[in-house]
Image (cartoon, coloured by chain):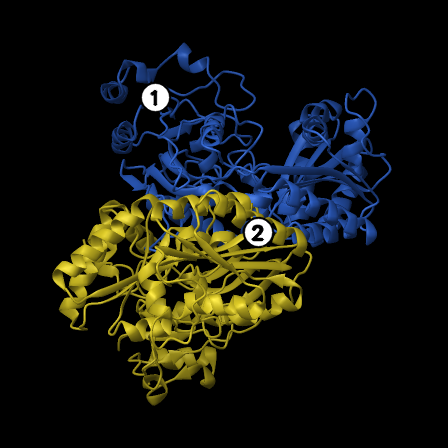
Chain colours: A yellow, B blue
Amino acid sequence: MHKLLEEIKNIVGPAGVLLGDDVSGRSDNWPPTGGCQAQAIIRPASTREVSEVLKLCHAAGQSVVTHGGLTGLVGGAKASKDDIVLSLERMGGMEPVDVVNRSITVDAGVPLQKVHEAAEAADLLFPLDLGARGSCTIGGNISTNAGGNSVIRYGMIRDQLLGVEAVLADGTIISSLGGVIKNNTGYDLKQLFIGSEGTLGIVTRAVLRLRPLPRSCNTALVAIESFELLGQFLSDMDSALGGTLSAFEVMWNDYYRLIIGDGSNHGHPLGSEHGFYVLLESTGGHEKSDTARFDAALEEAFESELIVDAVIAQSKKQREDLWAIRDDIERLTQMLMPPIVFDISLGIPQMDDYVKEVRQQLTERWPDSRMVVFGHLGDGNIHLVLTVGSHDPGEVHAADSIIYEALGRRQGVISAEHGIGLQKREFLKHSRSADEITLMKTLKTALDPKGILNPGKIFAIEEN
Amino acid sequence: MHKLLEEIKNIVGPAGVLLGDDVSGRSDNWPPTGGCQAQAIIRPASTREVSEVLKLCHAAGQSVVTHGGLTGLVGGAKASKDDIVLSLERMGGMEPVDVVNRSITVDAGVPLQKVHEAAEAADLLFPLDLGARGSCTIGGNISTNAGGNSVIRYGMIRDQLLGVEAVLADGTIISSLGGVIKNNTGYDLKQLFIGSEGTLGIVTRAVLRLRPLPRSCNTALVAIESFELLGQFLSDMDSALGGTLSAFEVMWNDYYRLIIGDGSNHGHPLGSEHGFYVLLESTGGHEKSDTARFDAALEEAFESELIVDAVIAQSKKQREDLWAIRDDIERLTQMLMPPIVFDISLGIPQMDDYVKEVRQQLTERWPDSRMVVFGHLGDGNIHLVLTVGSHDPGEVHAADSIIYEALGRRQGVISAEHGIGLQKREFLKHSRSADEITLMKTLKTALDPKGILNPGKIFAIEEN
């Protein structure tokens, strides 16, 4: 073991350094397949240890890839044989919920679900939620600016953070854990570490804002015939449900047919002939008046002929069954083998035309290709899942280019939630100008002049 | 006129350059008193002109102070005789409201109120609101991260921005005007320009997010006896009003007595013997169910003995009368001559103890001093207004030190909304660590290596 690792071991102790098979038996990507190539996995137990390790790495010019729950989807945690991995898995401390300030302070290695549980035990809600909740960590959520199912109501994790502690490349600890909502005392430094995928600093701790736990939940699946009416329906529901709209998930006809089709174990809550299906949900604080308002809003939409059919969940089980249609990613990817998955944002006015254009281009090139569309329409974020019948990298790349090029022309965004990592680096130029990328590199160089933090992710620093 | 100004005139035209009395007749601070000392006031008419002017200034090492509506309260727009002022007053363009995407793209020089009017004409709301709405500009709102009356529901302007265009010190235009809610494509560069008081770039344009225009409004003034119950009442109302709570403004007894006291033209909606008064408001989308819920929430608070008295506004006039008590800053400052005004944040659990401590310290030093307390308790932000019977700078400084020192010990924030500018620079250390301030300077140096943008504001770059 070379000198640097010996010095690191003096800081983190023998349990804090993994080598050899303990490294290669682990993954650095999702889905987990093993084969991490890093020199070593370092497991610090405190912010101070992270700082001391980074001081050594900085002095030695040693590159560092930070690992959280390893549920990212863009290769943001991939490590080469030159890197060492810093895993925050031993940093799982949580302070008690502060019920008056409605916040909780946690270490970066805490899984999202543990925060949910602690909040709920105090009759509060941590509204960030996503499928990987059991594995993903708060540190990873912050460094990828995680979104998920409740963005329309509560925003991304960027909006849930009252404070962040992070360690810079040279080991400096930047601790902004005051936990207040409003703070206009100079630059809001925590923004640097949110969504920057571990390239500007390592998040070690955070103060999370908690919200009241909803006391009511109303859910419906609604059928709508045209995209134009869909936009109007979103706007009307956002008005009518005034601040309580908590989900507006849209499924295009192709998605709905595929999910409830032959061999599916979902029911047929609505006929499959409609243009679009909306899973609508509202959560509030007063069961009776919330339900009255939800029903009135749907009734108004019927009367103004925005919607043509609807089913309102009458029980928790019915609610879960409706959500299961929206969430059956397993069936989706099985039916579209091999799947290519996209996570894009664009203005709602451009969306319909965009989907039609890329569908046509895909069909022209691959007559047997298939694409389904669904997503968080209320946030301007949709997912496209498609197959061109091949996982040949050249074919996949050609599909990527069709999707991203048509998006770039509409000022769309190639990654709404997942980040850039390694996988989308090449396409970054479709969403960000050359001057923006140059400014990102200026920040990177200012904060990490030796380029030791998660090198090569988002952009290659040496590119010009 | 020297060479640089001649070159600038070639870019912005003769109407774009003010000199001599046209400069000294203007102000660079609030309240306006004239006496701007800058060499010249430059009035570009487009982002391109801002860029061309900055290129020249950057090459010449010429310092630039940007002016918006000049309603800031911390000296952030003060210009010395070495500076030139860049006023964005000719950049007042607005695109039509995009009703489907619910956004509007405007130039930085547009006054806030014009955005309100455009949004309302499209049956939408731009929720940022503050007293200076007729004069303050969107560019100034962004560069100070303005807060105001609706933060508890909608957040600061940081949360209302879908895109920002800004010009860097060297003239580079960073244009991120895509207008989508979710964008995880590398660093979120717009964050750099929000709240950095014109020191990292000049904001020239923005895409603002609009919300549904509320269709209902319920308002009450409520009396509560203890601070402990106040926290519980906030928490309960936030739960019960589930997402529709739009104001939770608290007045300490001293504030309420002063405002409704002798010579006041306010009525006495509630007796003046209670510990605290809360102006509670809820806005929603469905009049009938919203009112039912609001009334039920107050009734529950009575039953659980959280509140002891309440008056619910029965008309627009009654609502305005209640708000007039909260907003009568004119009477407040007249009664506390000469006034010293503070705008601080701290955790709600620390607030009561903090107010008691500083009140005691003030009374010990100035037995005749007087302080009243009120503010946006729901955001953890309160205002202290006090008088020590003198405007001698030494006395004022001693009062500042009492307020900020006790705050720093509680991890409080010396500026919740107003920013740092020149006036609070000395006290920044009470809210931000030395490492944080060093990192701010690293950013400043990276983005503005010659230090030409609003020099000396927030921190003096040469300090160590």
Compared to residue A240, the image places residue B18 above or below, namely: above
Tell me the amino acid under the disc marked 1: Arg
Quarter of the image where one finds residue B269: top right
Q: Residue A333 at what x, y percent from top left?
A: 31, 72
Q: Quadrant of the N terminus of chain A?
A: bottom left
Compared to residue A235, the image places residue A258 above or below, namely: below
Q: Chain of mark 2?
A: A
Q: Residue A171 at what x, y percent from top left?
A: 43, 64
Q: Chain of mark 1?
A: B
Q: Residues within 10 Å of mark 2 (few under 14, many from 20)?
A: many
Mark 1 and 2 residues: CB-CB less than 8 Å, in contact?
no
Residue at the spot of label 1: B43
Q: Is residue B11 visible?
A: yes
Give the side of residue A199 with respect to residue A179, left or right: left
Quarter of the image where one finds residue A33: bottom left
Q: Residue at x 42, y 59 (%)?
A: A145
